[in-house]
């Protein structure tokens, strides 16, 4: 079948895309200037000799093209160098911090998906009812409010006023809740996940409701009802499956930009994830870390797009494998 | 003979809400007191301009749209009193063919799944379903090998064949066809109409056939009901309707329908003005603002449905005049 060829073509295209990003990234980082000179500029008495030897230590001597290919070969082996500030291998840091980010982002997207399906079905099957208008208004509001605002509101209510949930961090430094790392971790996840669920649910509901309303008007829905199919199966079987395509597009984007929005969430809740790390790296010009994270974000985005394209083919037989 | 489908005083009213407080601003009387019968093995055509309530009536007959008032008897059962289970059983016997075969087939399902869904719903085994699907696809001029294809792989005519196969699953007695060929190419229309007529003969089906194409209706129908603004204005056997239409609206419709037969060419009498809004229908006879023969009484009072010949009912105050002296009818039609 053409499916394998289609996937192969998409894979090659994705690889080219990542390569392109790596070139631009490398060029831009170089345009900032020699990081050693910048880092050491405030320390007088540094001789050219010292700068040269430090540059050699970090592999910053040699021509730009040489350094690019050295770097490219290294990242293909998942070696992003050593963080200047933290003095740790960047690859290890990306894994540790990345897992913390995924720990709040993945559950948030999945919960939001389930919640928004239920809300959309309730609203779309009662189009123009009070409930429907309420859902639209709520989703608009949730979609328009900045994420950090919701986060701060959650902290105010649940941490400051009610005092039942922690406002920062992924773990307690002492006195673990119920002496369990697992429960303590989950307890810390509630607020950041809650904020992301709120935000994602709003957007997903807006999309899914309008898509469902459109599908429910179609003749094949009436045809299914006319055949005697129970309403529940009409909605969940026929309608939802067809209403899911625009939602799938957004889900793909959502998984991709997860790391792009992570800095906001992780700053509000002081979460030790990739987002917070990225901000730190940029502020301190930790260029191996910046480059490593940028490449990881690129991988995620391109990967999510690739998966979405493949999912389309699986979900919609009309999409041509061209 | 008891009719297969007996519709009595059926009404479908839609409330209209306006303004920020969504106050009720009025009622659209999409279908307003319609009575008609479909007998076993016959085709009753329902004709009228777009917006006159034909499709709403079709949906109401199948209880896809809950009627506001009236009675609905199908195979001797009072459809409006059936509970969910009995209604589901009744749906096996009354099916629908839709206008647009592109919108009426779920794009995600294969032809076999679309045609076979009714078998699943009504508790048939997999084997029964597969055998039924193959038989139905053959019946409508496709083949069992088409079952694995998706709707987008078929042409418009083929899709409509799938739509017909779906409607024929589990041996229905009544098929409501809502403009089944008007979305198709003219060359394909004839094939589908012939198929429908052939199937009717073989399977003893009854059709409620909705159309705005009077030539097509003349070809396929046994009787015709003409609808205007939610009401039936004339019901007649096919020959008498075309030979001697009694309602001025029917006359105008026939006059507006182009003919290639030079003997049947006649002056075009297009009714003045637009179809009035069903939100505020005119007083008396709803057709009077557009009717060239309207008299004072037409404005004042709704004419009753008069039977002027066997099986020929008409809702017009002056129908007696046209019936007595059809040659004096101002619009020469069909002669």
Image: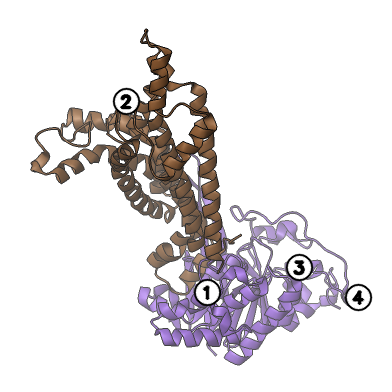
The residue under the point 49% across, 28% down is: A62
- Quarter of image, res B183: bottom right
Residue underneath mark 3: B253
Q: Colour of chain B?
A: purple
Residue at mark 2 shares a chain with residue at mark 4: no
- Measure the alpha-carbon separation of dots 2 and 4: 95 Å
When asked about the image quadrant of residue A263, the answer is top left
In this figure, which residue is indicated by the disc labeled 2? A85
Mark 1 or 2: the one toward you: 2
Q: Nearer the viewer, mark 2 or mark 4?
A: 2
Secondary structure under tag 3 reads helix
User: Toward the viewer: B121 or B214?
Assistant: B121
**Relative depth, front residue between B250 and A145:** A145
CA gap between label 3 and label 2 equals: 86 Å
Binning the other alpha carbons within 10 Å of mark 2 as few (below 14), some (14 to 19) or many (20 upward) gives some
Please, is residue A138 above or below residue A226 in the view?
above
The brown-tinted chain is A
Counting from the top left corner in percent of width and height, residue B62 is at 50, 73
């Amino acid at each position: 079948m053409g499916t394998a060829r289609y996937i192969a073509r998409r894979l090659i295209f994705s690889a080219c895309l990542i390569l392109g990003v790596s070139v631009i990234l490398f060029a831009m980082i170089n345009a900032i200037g020699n990081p050693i000179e910048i880092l050491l500029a405030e320390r007088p008495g540094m001789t050219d000799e010292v700068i040269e030897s430090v540059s050699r230590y970090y592999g910053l001597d040699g021509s730009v093209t040489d350094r690019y290919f050295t770097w490219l070969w290294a990242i293909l082996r998942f070696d992003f160098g050593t963080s200047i500030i933290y003095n740790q291998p960047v690859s290890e840091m990306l894994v540790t911090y990345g897992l913390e980010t995924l720990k709040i982002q993945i559950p948030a997207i999945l919960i939001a998906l389930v919640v928004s399906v239920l809300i959309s079905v309730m609203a779309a099957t009662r189009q123009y009812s009070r409930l429907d208008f309420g859902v639209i208004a709520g989703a608009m509001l949730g979609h328009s409010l900045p994420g950090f605002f919701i986060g701060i509101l959650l902290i105010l209510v649940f941490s400051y006023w009610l005092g039942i949930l922690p406002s920062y961090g992924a773990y307690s430094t002492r006195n673990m809740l119920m002496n369990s790392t697992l429960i303590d971790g989950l307890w810390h996840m509630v607020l950041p996940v809650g904020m992301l669920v709120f935000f994602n649910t709003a957007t997903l509901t807006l999309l899914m409701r309008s898509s469902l309303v459109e599908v429910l008007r179609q003749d094949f829905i009436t045809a299914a009802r006319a055949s005697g199919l129970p309403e529940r199966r009409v909605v969940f079987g026929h309608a939802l499956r067809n209403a899911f395509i625009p939602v799938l597009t957004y889900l793909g984007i959502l998984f991709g930009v997860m790391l792009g929005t992570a800095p906001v969430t992780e700053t509000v809740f002081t979460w030790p994830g990739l987002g917070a790390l990225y901000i730190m790296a940029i502020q301190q010009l930790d260029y191996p870390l910046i480059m490593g994270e940028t490449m990881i974000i690129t991988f995620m985005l391109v990967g999510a797009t690739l998966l979405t394209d493949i999912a389309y083919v699986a979900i919609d037989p009309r999409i041509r494998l061209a | 003979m008891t009719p297969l489908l007996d519709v009595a005083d059926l009404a479908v009213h839609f409330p209209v809400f306006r303004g920020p407080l969504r106050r009720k601003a009025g009622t659209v009387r999409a279908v307003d007191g319609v009575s008609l019968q479909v007998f076993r093995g016959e085709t009753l055509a329902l004709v009228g301009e777009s917006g006159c309530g034909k499709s709403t009536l079709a949906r109401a007959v199948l209880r896809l749209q809950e009627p506001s008032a009236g009675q609905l008897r199908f195979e001797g059962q009072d459809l409006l009193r059936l509970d969910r289970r009995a209604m589901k059983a009744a749906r096996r016997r009354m099916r629908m063919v839709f206008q647009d075969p592109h919108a009426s087939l779920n794009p995600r399902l294969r032809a076999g799944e679309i045609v076979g869904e009714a078998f699943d719903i009504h508790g048939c085994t997999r084997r029964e379903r597969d055998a039924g699907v193959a038989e139905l696809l053959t019946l409508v001029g496709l083949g069992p090998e088409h079952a694995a294809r998706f709707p987008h792989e078929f042409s418009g005519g083929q899709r409509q064949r799938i739509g017909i196969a779906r409607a024929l699953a589990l041996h229905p007695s009544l098929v409501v066809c809502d403009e089944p060929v008007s979305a198709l190419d003219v060359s394909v229309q004839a094939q589908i109409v012939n198929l429908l007529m052939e199937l009717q003969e073989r399977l003893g089906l009854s059709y409620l056939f909705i159309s705005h194409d009077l030539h097509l209706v003349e070809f396929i129908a046994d009787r015709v009901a003409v609808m205007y603004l939610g009401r039936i204005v004339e019901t007649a056997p096919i020959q008498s309707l075309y030979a001697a239409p009694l309602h001025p609206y029917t006359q105008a419709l026939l006059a507006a329908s182009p003919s290639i037969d030079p003997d049947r060419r006649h002056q075009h009498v297009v009714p003045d003005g637009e179809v009035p809004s069903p939100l505020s229908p005119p007083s008396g006879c709803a057709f009077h603002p557009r009717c060239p023969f309207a008299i004072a009484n037409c404005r004042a009072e709704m004419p009753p449905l008069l039977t002027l010949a066997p099986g020929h009912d008409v809702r017009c105050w002056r129908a007696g005049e046209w019936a007595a002296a059809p040659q004096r009818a101002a619009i020469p039609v069909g002669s």
